[in-house]
Amino acid sequence: MPPRVATVLFFVGIFFLFALNRKRDAHYSKALWIPVIWLLIAGSRNVGQWLDMSSPMDQDRYLEGNPIDRVVLGSLMAIGLVIIFQRLKKAQAILTANFAVLLYFFYCGFSSLWSDYPDVSFKRWFRGAGDLIMVLVILTDDHWLESIKRIVSRVVLFLFPLSVLLIRYYPNLGRGYNIAGSAMFWTGVTTDKNGLGVLCLIFGLATVWNFLELYKEQKQNGGKWTKPFYVQGFLVLIMIWLLWESNSMTSISCFVLSLSLLLSVGRWQFARKPLATTFLTLSAVGLSAMVLFGGFGAVLEALGRNPTLTGRTEVWHILLPFAQNPWVGSGYESFWLGDRLKKIGNLTSNGINEAHNGYLEIYLNLGWIGLILLGIVILSGYRRVIAAIRLNPEEGKVRLAYFLIPLIYNFTEAAYKMMSPVWIFFLIAIMAPLPAPTSESPAKIESETSQSLPVSKRRMRYALGNRL
């Protein structure tokens, strides 16, 4: 089939899927289109790259950025700020409850002062603040959880079919080759195979969750299947195919682990208890760490990877001596700039521009202080996720899954950074307002049980609970 004919048919199909997926009785805020556009860009390529106006080999352009991108992203941020000011009380409540996140963002911006390129560092921090703006636009919506489903549906209805179109009919855009030119991989709407893996991981997990929710809803309504159910099922099939063909083992592993955790917490009540949830989470993180760093080379080889994690271990040893300051780092998003980038490129011979480990990346850019602040964000965020599970297991299980993903994904990739879908959905998971208790909530059951106890026993239980 000629590419032009395929393009027309694909876009007609996308329009048809949008029509089928529409819920006529549902009303969503038009403001949601702002984070939708932001995520469309974050999940694929910058506008300048789509227009082929940026070249990664041009150092000056790499430092200055693309004017088209600045206009588009700056406009989205400005509109997002207007929306937030209209919902100021809700936004203030969310930010107050997430002081650790604000402290981390403030430090990132402050670190641009000691960067070798302070103007570039500050521009990148300003763009990174756009992620926080989009998160607040989503979370200040009256029904933010339902809005997430709608946002994800809009994004995947564009990006999943478009990835298939580019891979099949526009190989110069949808495929790539390794540096040696000996191996071909799929990129779809993204710029590399890991980007395609992240697209399927983050938005695919939400699509599976949406599909399962629709399945449960249809069973409760007598088994009458709706059009959105079939659309979501079709998108799940595309996602599985793209994820597998991306050959991004990090994304595949994270998808399996996070989906397993989501299903476990959603199905078994014992898994919702804080101790059991913590055990399951730590087990997933610990198992991943043992396989990657614990000398289990046979497991990696069985998964089609070499024990050096495709050369990552050698790269990590090369990067550490380049750390500018162990305590404060090189400044926000400043490590991979200037002569240092050229020297590292000569030593590694593969033109890398990230550490392929999110924690090492934070250390190189923000030092130990940055790592400590990130650790505080993770710990405080986990407390909120656990509280959400106790109050509303259906919401809490999704937040837990997206909390888990970056912990594991950043073992071999750097995703604690601006406009990374992994980072954006992590912020949503930890910053979202705590839900109201449901009938299945362990917290509500415990509260109702405690009301039947004598007053003295209730006081003792309350005191013990506060100590714990």
Image: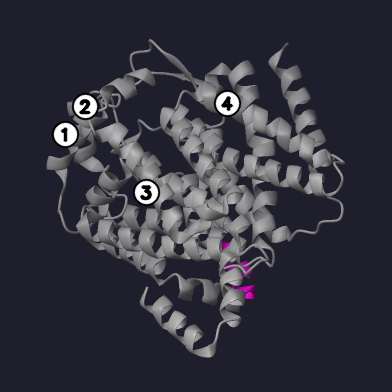
Residue found at the far bottom of this picture: 455
Chain part drawn in magenta? 78-87
- Whether residues under marks 1 and 3 lie with C-beta atoms below 8 angstroms apart, the answer is no
Q: Which residue is mark 4?
A: 242
Classify 47 as above or below 100.
Answer: above
Q: What is the C-alpha distance between the residues marked 1 and 4?
A: 33 Å
Q: Earlier in the sequence, mark 1 or mark 4?
A: 4
Q: Mark yes or no: residue 75 visible.
A: no
Q: Quadrant of residue 307?
A: top left
Residue 172: x and y in percent read 53, 19
Q: Is residue 408 magenta?
A: no
Q: Which mark is residue 291?
A: none
Q: Which residue is mark 1?
A: 318
Q: What is the C-alpha distance between the residues marked 2 and 1?
A: 8 Å
- Whether residues under marks 2 and 1 lie with C-beta atoms below 8 angstroms apart, the answer is yes
Circle 4 packing at 10 Å, graded few (<14), some (14-19), many (20+), is: many
Q: Earlier in the sequence, mark 1 or mark 3?
A: 3
Q: Which mark is residue 282?
A: 3
Tell whether 340 sits left or right of 35.
left
